[in-house]
Amino acid sequence: MYDPPELRDATDAWWSGLARALRREGICAVPDRLTRGTPAQVLWGAPDLLITQTCGYPLVCGWAARLAYLATPHYAAPGCDGPDNCSFIIVHADSPASSLEDLRGLSCAYNSRDSHSGYNVLRSTIAPLARSGRFFGAVVEAGSHAECAALVARRQADVACIDAVTYALLTRLRPNVTGATRAIVATARAPGLPYVTRAGADGGLIARLRAGLATAAADPSLAEARAALLIDKIEVLPEARYAQIAEMEAESCRLGYPALA
């Protein structure tokens, strides 16, 4: 999920090492290369899906019957605490806004409706302030966290909600973008983007996938790739931890704010 063009070599190196570890666990037909350029929903629904990374929101709110949880990476980025991540609500560096209330009536860019870190947690944060189901003056779907940040930097949107890992990566890779923005609020934390496989995968395959992830996470030869991707370690969480993401959605609806508006 964190695969900007500037990090493709590191992502490919991480996959190469993980694929090697999976083969050592006896998993057959491990691809040599990652599948890129296919819509996430197509990948998530593939009957031969081996391993991918998804957002916690689709995992519990729409794709629970199609995906099986494996493990959660820890990321070494500001706003991350073990497996839990927050998002930063950002504005332009020159914006006078300093609180959530200051954002009322402004334009907001979000990455996609099936995102926890860019949509669900923002909706949850704004819900107590909304009036008759509205808060922002306008909302626009930008397609990615990076594009949301770029829109704010270019003053084409006033507000966006960027997950902590993406914001840290952009700060390193595209400082011209993050340098033109600033965070005014950190959202509540929730478990970060999990690794998953297809639903219906047998327990033996899931155990081997988790073992391969653990091996790759400790492989010294992959330290450089992990550092570039901000991966600190990998942990298998109780799946119930992800229920808080669905609870945020339910609470927003209870407060009369079912959609960003």
Image (spheres, helix red, strand yellow):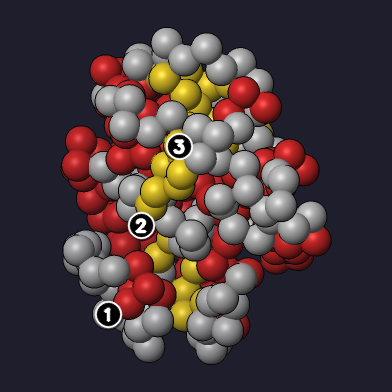
Q: Which residue is mark 3?
A: 107
Tag 1 secondary structure: loop
Residue 39 percent location from the top left of the image: 29, 69
Numbered disc in front, either 3 or 2:
3
Residue 257 is left or right of residue 35, and the answer is right
- Label 2 and label 1: CA atoms lie apart by 13 Å
In the rendered structure, find residue 29 and report the number of the disc placed on it.
Answer: 1
Q: Callout 3: 10 Å neighbours few (<14), some, many (20+)?
A: many
Residue contact at pointers 1 and 3, CB within 8 angstroms = no
- Residue type at tag 1: Ala
Numbered disc in front, either 1 or 3:
3
Closest to the observer, 87 or 126: 126
- Residue type at tag 3: Ser
Closest to the observer, 216 or 102: 102
- Label 1 and label 3: CA atoms lie apart by 47 Å
Q: Which residue is at 28% across, 25% downward? A: 154
N-terminal of the two: label 3 or label 2? 2
Residue 16, image quadrant: bottom left
Residue 8 percent location from the top left of the image: 21, 44
Q: Which residue is mark 2?
A: 18
Q: Is residue 165 visible?
A: no
Q: Is residue 126 visible?
A: yes
Residue 122 is left or right of residue 219, and the answer is right
Residue 180 percent location from the top left of the image: 35, 16
Tag 2 secondary structure: helix
